[in-house]
Each structure stands twice: as C-alpha cells, then as structure tokens.
Image (cartoon, rainbow, N blue to C red):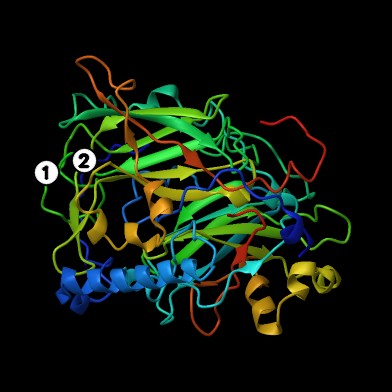
C-alpha cells in the first residue's frame, strides 16, 4: 500500500468531460433526475421489473454519456474461469490493513468510525475468505490522489486506503475516519455525498463488484447524479449504512453497520455441493 | 441460454454497483499488479490494447482486471496475487490504463479448460463515468475450429464476434482493444443470476 501522500506533479483536469457542462445548474440536473425517476416509477406501475442496479446510461451524470455501451449486455452462460474466483489469503493482506487510522505516525484528523457488516451472496450465504478493499476522502473531503486538486487540506496521517479478508461468516470491519462531502465538476456547485468506495469479490468472478457506501441522512442524496443513477428508491437505500450504537465504542469511535449482497453464484447450484471456500 | 431460464431466483436483492470514480489511484493499483508472470519467463505473453469512449478518444482513468486459466487450462486457486513472489501463477491481475488509455498485462496464453473449448481470458472494466463494471471475454485467435464451435461467439453477429477475439501480433503479443461505445463497441456480457 503506497504511503506517498503528496505529489508536486500538476495535471490538466482530465476528469472533466466537458468544461461547458460545469455551467449547468443544479436545478437543471435535478430536473433531469426527477424526469427519469418519474418515468421509472410509471414503468414499474405498468408492470416492469424493479431495477436493482444503476443505469449505465444516466445522462445527469455527464461523464457517463460517452462511456456506456449502447447495446444491451449479451447474456452468457458462465463457464470455467467465470465460475471461480481468485484466491486471497494472509500473504495478500495484513490484518492491520483494515485500520486506516494507524498507517502513519500520528492520529488522523476527524471523527473516528468503525464500519462493520457482512458480505453475503444473493442466496443469503456468507462470502468467506474474499478480498474487500476500501478507499475514501479524508475528513476534509480530499483524496490522496494526484488528480484531486480540491483545495482542502491533505492529512499527513491519512491515506484513506484499507483492505481485509472476509471472515468465516462473511464478516468484515474497518476502522477509519468519516469522510466529508467534496465538490466535483459535473455541473455548477455539484457536491458528492460523503461516501466510502468498496471493492468486493464473490465465489464466482461474475459476482465481482465495486460500489460506494453512504452515510444516513445526508442532505446531498437527492442532488447527486451518481447516487440517483439507481432509479429504484429501495435499491438506493441499500447503499446507505445504518448508525449502530452496538458498534460504537466508549470514548473511541462511532459505529456503522453495512451488509453487502453480491449476486447469486452460478456455480454451486449447478453442481454437487463442494467445499465452499 | 439454458441456465438463464432455469436459474433460481435470488433470495436477497443485490447491493447496487457504483462507478469506481477517478480517485482509486492509491487504493487499487499495487506493485506488479499487471504481472501475472515475470516477463522473462518462457511462455510469457504481453496482452495489451487501449480503452476508448464513444468518440474514439482514449480513456485515461479506466481500471482493468483479468482472470484466466493457466497454459494447461487449469483454473488455479493460489493466493499471492497482491504480494507476488515472482513464481506463483495466480491467474488474476489488475492494471490502471496509462495517460494515453493503454494497458499491458504480462501473462500466459490460457489453455482450453476442456478438449475442444475455445480458450479465453475474462476481462472486467471499471472507469469513471461507467456506473457499473462491465464483463467481457478475450478469446485467443489461434484455434479457429474451437472458435467456430463456441456457443457464445456463435450467438453473435460477425461484428460482435470480432470484438471478442484478440489479434496475435508479430512478436507474439495479444492485442485487445476495449471500446465502451461507438462503431466497434465491445460486446459486454451479463450472467444468469446477476439480479
């Protein structure tokens, strides 16, 4: 894990798709979101299936315009390599990597939190022994990243990167600092809700996913085109952690619970039950 | 697709995916992440190409992962992908594209997992602007009989098929470009029990 916290390199702002887009107002973006959501609700009333995943063609998130496939995903019967997952173990991840607050010489600034939960598959089975990676901004909303030029302070004691291997019941726990919202250039005055990125593996590689965990009650939810790209309200709610006082510890850290559900395994139900790893 | 029709319903609704965003740089890349084998190893192969958007412009902030069988067609189950010892083939690798949208893996030609099967490498694509990951397959170009019999390739039209078969370059490298949108749009896959 790199601890190179700063860089003097300067970069053109290559994550801005179209500088002109930044002149659009929040109201214009919000109106687009409202229209798409209204059409979705109507389609469900008319009998369409609920959507459990984000739309990949979600125009209010301007960067998606040229980066979403225009053809439908092609249905494939998974075979061989797709029905297995890479193996991860103690050689890959040290136990201390799940504590993002101890990777440098001092205590990071901010609200110390513990995020804990379980990783399950779509059949409710725990996903054990798999890699879970997290990354996030610091308590001021700044990433340690050469392209993040947001003028908020870098915390020399916080890189915002952690890893863990899920336990026998799919459990995981990270100790970290609550990240802050930060501005971005999708439109004028665009701010991302505070979030932690999660990268997950299942027992089939077809279960591989990357997502973002949000914090309850964030006033920026309704304004954010990335979060709102999930058109279904119940599905959106699944990305929001729950404050959990049983995870909170005395004079140390507040606690959040967040369980993650991957898709179903395509393998085990087709074959004789073999040892689950 | 047979399994698509018979796959049992999921008990739990899956958590939605989200974009990887642009700032994964200190989290996901790691030392030798794209070196499944050392390039000096006999049989080492370069797999490379570019990732482009709907304008044909290269994407500088995509992240790719591959997962494949070894050269004998065995699916390995060995750890050590994140801390490579230089000898163990784990079958899995990751790389961020560079400033000009180009990626390189050093790997092995995967073998066929069964007699007569067309060998392929599984590829997963993540990028800012891409709201959920995309899956595809990189087929090796050589075994044309196996390619002709492959059920997935057979279910595609000629243009779609072409996007999934790598090109063998004069030096033995495999060239595979990923096009998220547009004229040569790569065929991306979904699986029966995704949601």
Q: Nearer the viewer, residue B151 or A153?
A: B151
**B35 w.r.t. B179: above or below:** above
Specify the label residue B161 is tagged with: none
Tell me the quadrant of the picture where the N terminus of chain B can be found: bottom right
Label 1 is found on which chain of the structure? A
Question: What residue sits 65% from the left and 35% below the top?
Answer: B78
**B166 w.r.t. B65: above or below:** below
Tell me the quadrant of the picture where the C terminus of chain B can be found: bottom right
How far across and down, in percent of the image, does residue A109 sit?
15, 31
- Residue farthest along the front direction in this orientation: A45
Q: Are marks 1 and 2 in contact (CB under 8 Å)?
A: yes
Residue B36 seen in this snapshot: no
The answer to which image quadrant residue B129 occupies is: bottom left
1 or 2: tag closer to the N-terminus: 2
How far across and down, in percent of the image, does residue A28 sit?
20, 75
In this rendering, the label closer to the viewer, 1 or 2: 2
Label 1: which residue? Answer: A153
**A98 w.r.t. A184: above or below:** above
Q: Are marks 1 and 2 on the same chain?
A: yes
Label 2: which residue? Answer: A138
How far across and down, in percent of the image, does residue A235 sit?
43, 52
**A185 w.r.t. A102: above or below:** below
Position of B114 with respect to B165 (left or right) is right
**Dot 2 lies on which element?**
loop
- Residue farthest along the right direction in this orientation: B115
**Dot 1 lies on which element?**
loop
């Amino acid at each position: 894990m790199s601890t190179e916290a700063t860089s003097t390199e300067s970069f053109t702002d290559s994550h801005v798709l179209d500088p002109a887009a930044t002149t659009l107002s929040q109201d214009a973006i919000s109106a687009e979101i409202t229209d798409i959501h209204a059409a979705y609700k109507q389609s469900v009333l008319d009998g369409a299936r609920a959507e459990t995943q984000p739309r990949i063609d979600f125009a209010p998130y301007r960067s998606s315009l040229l980066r979403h496939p225009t053809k439908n995903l092609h249905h494939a019967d998974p075979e061989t390599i797709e029905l297995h997952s890479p193996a991860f173990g103690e050689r890959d991840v040290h136990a201390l990597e799940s504590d993002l607050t101890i990777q440098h010489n001092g205590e990071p600034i901010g609200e110390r939190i513990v995020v804990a939960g379980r990783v399950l598959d779509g059949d409710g089975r725990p996903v054990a022994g798999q890699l879970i990676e997290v990354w996030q901004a610091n308590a001021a909303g700044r990433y340690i990243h050469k392209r993040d030029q947001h003028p908020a302070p870098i915390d020399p004691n916080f890189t915002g990167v952690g890893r863990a291997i899920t336990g026998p019941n799919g459990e995981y726990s990270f100790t970290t600092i609550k990240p802050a919202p930060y501005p971005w250039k999708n439109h004028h005055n665009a701010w991302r809700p505070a979030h932690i990125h999660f990268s997950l593996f299942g027992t089939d590689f077809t279960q591989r996913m990357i997502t973002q965990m949000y914090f309850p009650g964030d006033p920026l939810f309704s304004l954010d085109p990335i979060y709102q790209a999930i058109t279904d309200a119940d599905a959106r709610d699944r990305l929001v952690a729950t404050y959990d006082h049983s995870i909170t510890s005395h004079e140390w850290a507040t606690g959040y619970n967040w369980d993650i559900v991957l898709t179903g395994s395509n393998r085990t139900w087709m074959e004789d039950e073999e040892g689950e790893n | 697709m047979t399994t698509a029709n018979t796959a049992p319903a999921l008990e739990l609704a899956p958590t939605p995916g989200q974009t990887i965003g642009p700032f994964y740089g200190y989290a996901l890349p790691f030392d030798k992440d794209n070196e499944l084998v050392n390039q000096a190893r006999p049989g080492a192969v370069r797999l490379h190409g570019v990732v482009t958007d709907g304008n044909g412009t290269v994407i500088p902030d995509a992240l790719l992962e591959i997962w494949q069988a070894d050269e004998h067609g065995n699916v390995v189950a060995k750890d050590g992908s994140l801390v490579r010892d230089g000898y163990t083939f784990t079958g899995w690798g990751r790389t961020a594209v560079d400033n000009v949208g180009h990626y390189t893996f050093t790997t092995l030609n995967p073998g066929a997992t069964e007699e007569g099967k067309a060998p392929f490498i599984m590829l997963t694509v993540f990028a800012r602007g891409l709201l959920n990951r995309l899956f595809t397959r990189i087929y090796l170009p050589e075994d044309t009989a196996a390619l002709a019999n492959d059920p997935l390739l057979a279910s595609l039209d000629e243009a779609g098929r072409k996007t999934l078969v790598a090109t063998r370059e004069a030096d033995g490298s495999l060239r595979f470009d990923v096009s998220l949108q547009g004229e040569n749009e790569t065929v991306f896959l979904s699986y029966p029990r995704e949601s």
